[in-house]
Structure formats: structure tokens, C-alpha cells
Image (spheres, coloured by chain):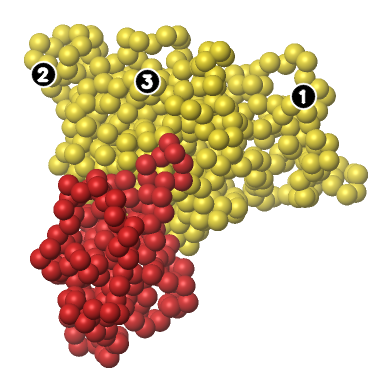
Amino acid sequence: MPPPPTETPTHVLCPLATLSPPSSLRTWQTAPHPSQPIVATACSDRSVRVYSLTSFTLLHSITGGHKRSVRSVSWKPGTRGQSVLATGSFDASAGIWRKKEQTQEQDFTRRGGDGDEEEDEDEDDYQFACILDGHESEIKSLSWNPSGQYLATCSRDKSVWIWEELEDDNFETVAVLQEHDGDVKCVAWHPTEDLLVSTSYDDTVRLYRDDADDWVQVTSITGHQQTVWWAEFEGANMASIDFRKEKEGLSEQQTKYIDLLDRSGPRLATCSDDCTVRIWRRRPREHQEGVGTGIPSIIRSVTIDEDWLQEAILPQRHDRAIYSISWSQKTGLLVSAGSDGKVIIYKERWKAQALNDEVEGVDGGEGLEWALTEWVVVAELFSAHDVFEVNHVTWAARADKGKRFEDEEVVLSTGDDGEVRVWALDELASENKV
Amino acid sequence: MDLDKQNANPTILNPSDLPSRRRETQVKRRDDGGTGLFDDLIPPYNYLNDPFDQAISSSDSDDDAVEQIDEQEVYDLISSISDPEHPLSLGSLAVVNLPDIHIQPPTSPHSCISTVVVEITPTITHCSLATVIGLGVRVRLEQALPPRFRVDVRIKKGTHSTDEAVNKQLGDKERVAAALENGTLMGVLRKMLSTCE
């Protein structure tokens, strides 16, 4: 395929497999298990399908729980001896499902599947554990926090709920956040802090945190011109993994910028109906002291409000709504997908030369560091699901026999055609670059 | 719904004034084996000079998926949708109009996604049924057109008091999907679309 207009991609997404059998109806989202080589896919046929990333085949179909489309799924992290799955549905309820992990147990009754190595496959099904009722209309998204203590859900009823699991199957509502003026499309958690993000039909992105047992909004981020469909935080400690790990030959400014990013913590990526992907960065607190007077303030503000700045708009390659983005925790690469059927992969790098005059007009005084990096498109895939829309895209650890190196990842795309497709990212040999 | 119609006296177009492709209406159907080479020679619509032309034939809706689809065909698919509060078609109420239908080709040679943009004109500026009508148009086209078409239904600018809000709803895939799982709303839509087949 000839290269797309502006830049020559350095990578290409190669089809590895389509998870089989696919759903006959639209699939919305696919969540990789935090530790096992399996994924759960939310289907509009009211079921959840659990597939193996080793054999690419269906292991379980979770049915009978929801009365409408299952829109969202999230695996609880850090569980021992069992897998716990939360499902959010257009029927306004969330379900919790459990399955015991059977370690090394031989099972001669397994059906289907063509590989020999699936130890996950057994007759034991996901058991319905409990239902979380409270939302007035469709649940659009749900997400466990990294410790597994909290589950956030959001809905067309404009609210975000935070649930805490006090003991198995006993959930308490710890917060009902009603800041948005429209459907809440997505919720996601910060990797290391109890900081929750939500995105909405009202075009805003909001962040919440626990302030003395009371969850409150700490900022509202505006910038997107249309519905914000998805948000995801950067992984923790990415500076030791991505382009920032190479410290040799950095300019003083670049070193300062790395330090600034370090103080800001993991960044936030969002995508929207306005066809943009944006990166946001928290303004480090220390920067607010002593502005103007030159005298460091000893009176700390009691407010826990945060200030998040738009750091970048990624190269615009989508010409219809972008429904999903995912930030690799292994490489720092970002992937996006949406209504136009494209899957785009972006990489951050140092700008060839820092432009000293490019000072952002906000009251920051951080302008010099501001524009030191840029995002470039490294791979662009058209028609990932033939003519169908792509509703979700995510990175997952590669687990099939073809795995080429430790920590290799695949991209999983979930489409209106009911299919989940698995893609490997191949680097183009430089002489092959057209 | 009949008791409190929002617009009790809508303007109704004469069927002979509705756009149609003269040669294809009534019993005669296009030879699908044809190459379409002469399509450009046929005027896209021709509505003032054929008093004998009948309104949209009910037999010409779901044509072949592979053939080129033009604005007239899109018009034919949606003009026969019934208004939710009048026993009249959206075509005869001039809610859908041929000049307000646009087909945009793929934006890149690598893409095969075409976009159909339909601007609808509600009969009155505060018609709360505008969303339902728009939804009916979107659903009709999503069901009848091949999946390579993306369907954008909008309220024609300046014809409705809350056109922006309605447009946003109609453009929201998730909301549309959820609406289609709503039994009551689907009943209304089914009734509107029952005159299409």
C-alpha cells in the first residue's frame, strides 16, 4: 500500500488473527485481563465473550445477566485465585462476575479450541456475583482503580458513581458525582493516585479526588469541541521506558523538561468527536508558589484543585469521531481508532530543535519546556474492520506462539462487525520505506 | 398523539411535484446488470415536467448494494417514511428534500467509506418530534444502505429552535444504539418505517 500523504510510516500493523467465533452483532469494547492471556469483549447481544489470546478462540460466553447491550467491561486488578469481571450495560445496571482460577488442574472435558496449551479452558463458568443498581439510564463505561478498591461507573444520567467493595460482593456507594451537563461517556483511573477522570457529551473532561472522605471535582478540562469519548492516563514511570530514558546528549532544556514531566506525573490522553486526540499535563504544584513576589509563599493553598494544561494535539488523521485511544505501558506508543475505520499509532519524540520563542500564552512560565517534544504517526491502518466502525482499541500483552520478544504487545480492535481483531506492530526495514 | 398535533395544518406537496427518476418509477426497474455508463446522461431529477409521474414507487427501495448510489436513491429510501403525527410521507411534507441530500465520496484513495449527509426540515421550528424524525431517517438509511456508508442526519440550519442539540443527539452513535433498544421508541420508528417497504 502506498504511503499516506504527509509522513512515511515507520511501522505497519499486520493482522495476526480475528478472535473466533466473532459475535453476530456489534461489539463495543475489549478488556485484556491484568495477568492472564485472556480478554473480555462487551457485546450488544447482551453477552460478554471471553477469548484466549493464546489460541484466539472463544473460552466463555457470559449470558443471562443483562437485559440490554453490554457496553463496557473491566477486570478487577490484583485478585488472587479468581478472576473478577465488572460489566456495564444499557439496562442501567452493572454486574459483578467471578470465576475461580484452576491452576494446573487437568481437564479432560474441554471442548472446542484447537491448541494444546490453553489451561484456562474448563467447564467452570463465570458466576454471577452481584448487581450494582443506582444509575437511571444506560451505563456507558466502568473501570476498577489500580488497587481494586474502587469501581467507577458512569451513565447517560450524567452521573459518575464510585463504588467500594467492602468485602466480597458487598459494595457501598462512596460517591455520586453530578458535575457533567451531559452523558458521561468514559471513566478511567490514574495509575498511582486515587484520581478519577470522566469524559462527556458536554465536551468536557473532569477529574475527581478524595478530599477527606468526600469525593470532589478537582478540575474541569475544556478544549475539545465535541463529545469526548475516551480518556486514558499514561502509565507510571514511563520516563524510564519511553524516549526519555536515553539521557545522553540531552540539552539543558530537555533535561529540565524531563524533570517537569516527572513532577507533573502521568499525563492524560483524550479523544473526541472533534477528530482530535489531545494530551494534558498537570501543572506541578511547586510552580504556583511565589509567583510575582519572588518570595516563596509559606501559606499553602488549602484547595485541592488541580490545573491541567493542554500539552499537545496529536497529528490529525481521523476524519470522523475518534471513539478510543490506548496508551501502551510498555512502549509509550498511543493508538487511536474510530468511526472512519482507521487505526493510527503515534510516537512521541524530541523535536529536532527547540523553538525558544514558542511560549504558551498561559500564566505558567513553563513555556520554554512546553514544545520540546512532538508526536508523529508511525503506523496508519485503513479499514481495520473492512467498512465498519472501530469502537475500541487497546494494547495487550502478546501471548500466542508467534511472540517475538519479551513484553511484545498486540493491538486489539473491536468493531461494529462483531469482530475483535489482533494486530502485530512490525517495524518496516528502512530500505522498504517507500 | 393524534389529539395534540404540533402542526395541525402542514404544507403538503403535490405528489407530482416530488422528485423522482422518471424512468425508474412505477413498474420499470433498472437493469442491475447494466454498467451505469449512461447514468450521467439522465438528469438526476426532473420534477416539473411530468404530470403523469407518480409518487415514489414502493418497489424501488432496497436495490443492489454494489451499484453506485446517488442522491435520488437516498431520497427514495427516506421520502416514503411516514411522519410520526400525520398520515403523510416525509417527502410530501417536504421534511426531506432532494437538494438537501449529499453524498460525499471517500476522503482518501485508501478508504472506501462514503458519507451520506441528509438535512431535514422540520415542519415547524419547535417541533419536538424532530429528533424522532431524524432518528427514523438515520435508522432507515443504516438499514438500507450498504455498511460502507456513514449516515449523518442533521436539522437544516435555521429551521429549528434547538437544531444544534438535535444534531448532536442524532450524531451520537451510542445514543442511537441505546434508543434502538428502547421498545416504545422502536414502536414509533417501526410505524414510521412501515410505509417504506
What residue sits right under mark 2 in the picture?
Answer: A111
Q: Chain of mark 1?
A: A
* Secondary-structure class at tag 3: loop
What residue sits right under mark 1 in the picture?
Answer: A255
Q: Position of residue A196 (x, y in %)?
A: 50, 43
Q: What is the distance, in whole Å, between disc 3 and disc 2 at their CAs?
A: 24 Å
Which label was assigned to residue A35? 3
Q: Quadrant of the C terminus of chain A?
A: top right
Closest to the camera, between mark 1 and mark 3, is 1
Q: Outermost residue, bottom direction?
A: B9
Label 2 vs 1, first from the N-terminus: 2
**Can residue A69 be seen here?**
no
Label 1 vs 3, first from the N-terminus: 3
Within 10 Å of disc 3 (Cα), the crowding (few <14, some 14-19, many 20+) is: few
Chain in yellow, by letter, is A
Chain B is shown in which shade?
red
Q: What is the distance, in whole Å, between disc 2 and disc 1 at their CAs?
A: 56 Å
Q: Chain of mark 3?
A: A
Label 3 vs 2, first from the N-terminus: 3
Q: Position of residue B70 (x, y in %)?
A: 31, 58
Residue A373 drawn above or below residue A298? above
Of residues B104 and A100, which is closer to you in this image? B104
Residue at 66% across, 17% down: A245
Q: Position of residue A427 (x, y in %)?
A: 50, 17
